[in-house]
Amino acid sequence: MSIRAIVVDDSALMRKMISDILNSDPDIEVISTAFNGKDAVDKTSKLKPDIITMDVEMPVMNGIDAVRTIMQENPTPILMVSALTEKGADITLESLQAGAIDFVCKPSGSISTNINEIGKEILEKVKNVAKAQISPIQKDISDGKVKEFSGSKIKTLLVDDSSFFIKTTEDILKKHPDIQIIGEANNGIEALKIFKQEKPDVILMDLEMPEMNGVEATHKILKEHFVPIIIFSSETANDMRDVKTALELGAIDFIAKPAKGTSMRSISQLLVQKIRDANKEQKNKNLKNIDPSDKIILIGTSTGGPQTLTELIPNIPSDISAGILIVQHMPPVFTKTLAERLDSISQISVREAKEGDEIKPGLALIAPGDYHMELKEKKINDETKIIVTLNQNDRIHGVRPAVDVTFSSAVNIYGSNTVAVILTGMGQDGANSMGLIKAKGGYTIAQDENTSIIFGMPQAAIKLGVIEKILPLDLIPAHIVKMLDIENRGKG
């Protein structure tokens, strides 16, 4: 059955162009259009659409008032279509708080020449938003370009007893000219032999293998010479004891193999980025100098996040004993506006992160749109500080900022003093890094299906087996506070 849509915009040209985009997909049918909010409210009542695309600024009744009225009278999934301006961001966030599910930005410049650039995004979001869970009361794509590369390649050794994973990993890595596969091993004994002969820069290591498993191979290799080892395993469904042991022995990172029924392509860019990051790793990087009392709270979300964050963040107490990092999939401008809104209604301080920001208890930093947010240690007046660093490295899971980037960076510094929460959102961003957090002794929480607007990101982490606790949204703030105390972890 087709998704029945109403397109709302005061521009006749925009109504036609969005309608043409939607009607180009056989799974979507535009059943009507509306030229302002009042017209949209009336037609929603009569036609009962599955989804509405809603302009923001319109005469008679604007997008915010239309959303509020529709959500009260005929709750319907709504996708906002807004301009990438401060005013557009402010109005859009009000609309999301009023009950809209997600938004897409209108292209800058000429509408007639640029609207088709966002056609794919509109189609994808319409299909996902149409599935959203709504109630009357509700408080980006990788460009696919191969970059030019000059310089030494990252010599990579693949170790796995599965010919399927060797082949699919090879297929992924061969598309990246800065990575060179210098060998393949089916077990730890072969890995040790190739390591001695080829001196790889990075090793991708499976755990369960015949003759010599990944834990033993990691131990023997690192006894001889340090090389960055990334554990690449499906151990997450169990207790992750072997993953933890390998990390304790000196492996520097972990990435979970995709859950059953999920393609390797889903983690391809994350895998590539982890190999690149591992190549920069120094032997002493795991020797952290942070105060044992320093703790971090990590929060990741996407579709439905702005509404969800307005219910979660204000319930975090002002005397919270940890710094907070928030990754919300959003473009530039919108993250700054979101931070200001959250700050105005919360007990803690909330702002958009800047390069060099220091992590402090009671301060929540939101990753700015179009930038990955990572942490690094820096000596300031002979004292080790944890500060924010921003970059525009490749998109991960098609987005920037990416939850996996921030979460992985943070847990590599804070270790077991990490409490991470994955909230409503499309896709699987954050699932893999939740595995790393669990392996390093941190605590992982996922929002439950009933309170998630889109149960994509939480579900992906749950399927990987890396979540300690699944909770409805209203119980998450108190549980975060409780789990900051490591002694409570066994009681969680």
Image (spheres, rainbow, N blue to C red):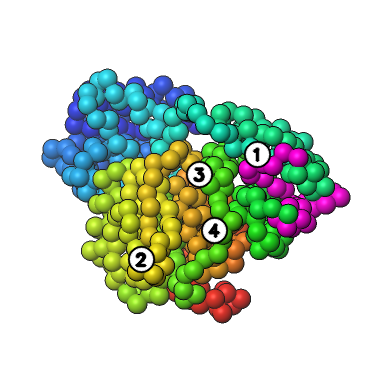
Q: Could you tell me the amino acid type at mark 1? A: Thr
Tell me the SS state at disc 1: strand
Q: Position of residue 254 (x, y in %)?
A: 62, 52
Q: Could you tell me the amino acid type at mark 3? A: Gly
Q: Is residue 386 above or below residue 394?
A: below
Q: Could you tell me the amino acid type at mark 4? A: Lys
The residue indicated by pointer 2 is 380
Identify which residue is drawn at 23% across, 63% down: 344
Identify which residue is drawn at 79% across, 53% down: 213
The residue indicated by pointer 3 is 427
C-alpha gap between disc 4 and disc 2: 18 Å
Q: Quadrant of residue 469?
A: bottom right
Q: Earlier in the sequence, mark 4 or mark 1?
A: 1
From this viewpoint, is residue 303 visible?
no
Q: Earlier in the sequence, mark 2 or mark 3?
A: 2
Identify which residue is drawn at 19% across, 28% down: 11
The residue indicated by pointer 1 is 156
| Residue stretch in magenta | 197-223
